[in-house]
Structure formats: structure tokens, C-alpha cells
Image (spheres, helix red, strand yellow):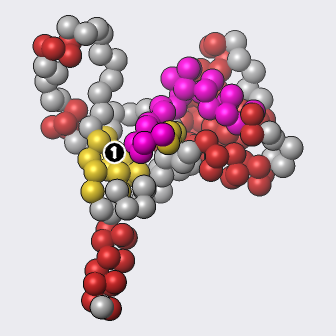
Amino acid sequence: MAVSKADFERRLTRFAETCRRSGLKVTHQRTEVFRELAAREDHPGAEAVYQQVRRRVPAISRDTVYRTLALLEAQGLVRKATVLVNQSRYDANMQPHHHFVCTVCGRVQDFSSAALDNLPLPRSVKSLGSVQSAQVQVRGVCTACAGETGKRKRAK
């Protein structure tokens, strides 16, 4: 499922407004890094963002992309989701949602659930501090990998 044009435009508008409100310049490089995330639902890692942006902006450095991702996260424009051990992915969808993580290929997909959004937090969590957000991560085998596994089993 692709990001709708309306969601993409909404994300870009929020990006520009947040930068201006924070006194940050809306540079071509920052915009391209954010555009790469805003147009995707697959939660790419920093290196994947760098490789894609570099196709459009050949002079961009890896360091610029990594620093820009950290800046975007600090401004609340993207979330870093550590869905696999030692591998951070980035998500420009700031609406409440949850993640399905494929344990075979590592693909991360968003899903919505009003029931999960409204799960009451236990007192033990609330006593630790002020909760700003909570997401549920569901792990399993995606349909593409399940289909490949099924093909391999049938071929034997």
C-alpha cells in the first residue's frame, strides 16, 4: 500500500512548518531526505535513505543524511523504530499506528487498531514517568515470505 498523495502532501507541509517554527532552514538536502521517508511506508534504515537520496542528489554525503535523520527525529517529524536487533528504521507516519515486523525478511508494515490505541497502560508504567506514545509491535512471517516458504515446501 502506497502513501496517498494527500498524506504525502500533509507530511511535507508539516515538515516545512516545523522547520520554520524551529528556525531551521528548509534546505534542498533536508527536504530530499524527508521526502524519501514521507513517500514510503516500508520504514527504511539510514543507509537505504542515503542510497535513494543520493540518486537524486549525487553530492549529498552519508554524514548529512545521518545528521538530517537525527534532526528530523529531534523535531518530531520522524520516529526511529528499532524493530530488529541493532537496526534502526525510520518512519514519517506520525499518526497513531503499530508495526508488523516480518521475522524472515525484516519488512515493517504499519497497521491501525483502535483497540490497541486504547489499551490502558499499567500503573507500573505510569509510575516510571510521563508516557508520550506507545506502539505495539507484532512479529510474524509476511505473506510474501509465507508464500515463498510454501513454494519451497511444495517443491521438496
* Residue 6 in sight: no
Q: Residue at x 13, y 19 (%)?
A: 122
Q: Residue at x 15, y 37 (%)?
A: 115
Q: Secondary structure at mark 1?
A: strand
| Front position in the image: 110 or 22 | 110
| Front position in the image: 141 or 38 | 141
Q: Residue at x 69, y 12 (%)?
A: 23
10 Å crowding of disc 1: few (<14), some (14-19), many (20+): some
Figure quadrant of the N terminus: bottom left
Instruction: Place residue 141 in its image quadrant.
Output: bottom left
Q: Residue at x 51, y 23 (%)?
A: 76
Residue 66 within the magenta-colored segment of the rendering: yes
x and y percent of residue 145 in the render?
Answer: 36, 69
Figure quadrant of the C terminus: bottom left
Instruction: Place residue 37 in its image quadrant.
Output: top right
The residue that mark 1 highlights is 99
Left or right relative to 105: residue 141: left
x and y percent of residue 58 in the render?
Answer: 84, 49
x and y percent of residue 150 in the render?
Answer: 28, 80
| Front position in the image: 127 or 4 | 127
* Residue 96 in sight: yes
Q: Which residues are magenta?
A: 64-86
Vertical position of residue 36 compared to residue 82: above or below: below
Left or right relative to 118: residue 104: right
x and y percent of residue 88 in the render?
Answer: 50, 39
The amino acid marked with disc number 1 is His
| Front position in the image: 103 or 64 | 103
Vertical position of residue 100 compared to residue 79: above or below: below
Vertical position of residue 74 compared to residue 118: above or below: above
Residue 28 within the magenta-colored segment of the rendering: no
Left or right relative to 33: residue 55: right
